[in-house]
Amino acid sequence: MRIPTLKQFVPVVFSLAITSVCLFGSSGRLNWSNAWVLLGLNFAASVASTALLSRNPDLLAERSNVKAGKNWDKPIVAIVVLLGPVATWTTAGLDNRFHWSDRMPPSAFIAGIVVAVLSAALVAWAMDSNKFFSSVVRIQKDRGHVVVTSGPYRFVRHPGYTGMSAFTLATPLILNSQWAFVPAVVTAAITGLRTVLEDRTLNHELEGYADYARRVKYRLAPPIW
């Protein structure tokens, strides 16, 4: 098994730094246990993803040296990857600081952790099963792009987005903030929009995807959609 290099952990550290600034800066305190739990989950998920990428140098190169994707994908990525999460963390921190909403029951916190862990595991499974798991929407003709039908792709066409959306919606539960659901739901909805647009792109431009889509009915959430 290939061991990840220190350079591969730079994005992990950078991501944790941004998350920490948003959470603790907006809440005005460091002794916020819910925030530390979320940071721990994010760190574990990031380390797992880094370890998986180290096993697939081609995929690591694809995700590290980002090539041009669809033009419509750029603003969506900015919202889903950066602006949406930042808004969710900051809103939760301000809610914690100024007590905008009532506290949720401990069961909500536990449910959030369970959903987050399962969601991160699903994303990792999708990444491990799909050597074309790119960070942008593009047909990877330079890498011999083909339809992936193994792993979670047997059950849903975009399991990575399923996991990302679920983790996003679990975040307000972990941070004990009802107001944080506002940016979280918007972020999840935009992830759904990206799913629709990417699914349409694959259907039109990737050979064999139309047949696969007829076999695997659901895009994100069986048996709903």
Image (spheres, rainbow, N blue to C red):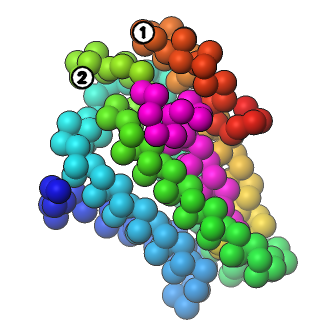
Q: Position of residue 119 (x, y in %)?
A: 56, 55
Q: Can the viewer see residue 79 in this picture?
A: no
Q: Quarter of the image holding residue 74? A: top left
Q: Main secondary structure of the magenta part?
A: helix
Q: Which mark is residue 143?
A: 2
Vertical relation: 36 (above or below) 151: below
The residue closer to the viewer here, 167 or 218, is: 218
> Which residue is located at x 26 percent, y 18 percent?
144
Q: Position of residue 158 (x, y in %)?
A: 54, 34
Q: Amino acid at mark 1?
A: Glu
The residue closer to the viewer here, 57 or 153, is: 153
Which numbered disc flags the more N-terminal residue, 1 or 2? 2
Vertical relation: 190 (above or below) 82: above
Q: Left or right of 107: which side holds 213?
A: left
Residue pointed to by mark 1: 207
The kind of secondary structure element at disc 1 is: loop
The stretch drawn in magenta includes residue 150? yes
Where, quadrant-wise, is the C terminus in this rendering? Answer: top right
Q: Residues within 10 Å of mark 1 (few under 14, many from 20)?
A: few
Q: Position of residue 48 (x, y in %)?
A: 36, 61
The residue closer to the viewer here, 70 or 51, is: 51
Q: Position of residue 112 (x, y in %)?
A: 67, 68
The kind of secondary structure element at disc 2 is: helix
The stretch drawn in magenta includes residue 167? yes
Seen from this angle, which residue lies furthest bottom?
31
Vertical relation: 183 (above or below) 16: above
Q: Left or right of 188: which side holds 126?
A: left
Q: CA distance from mark 1 to mark 2?
A: 14 Å
Q: Which residues are magenta?
A: 148-173
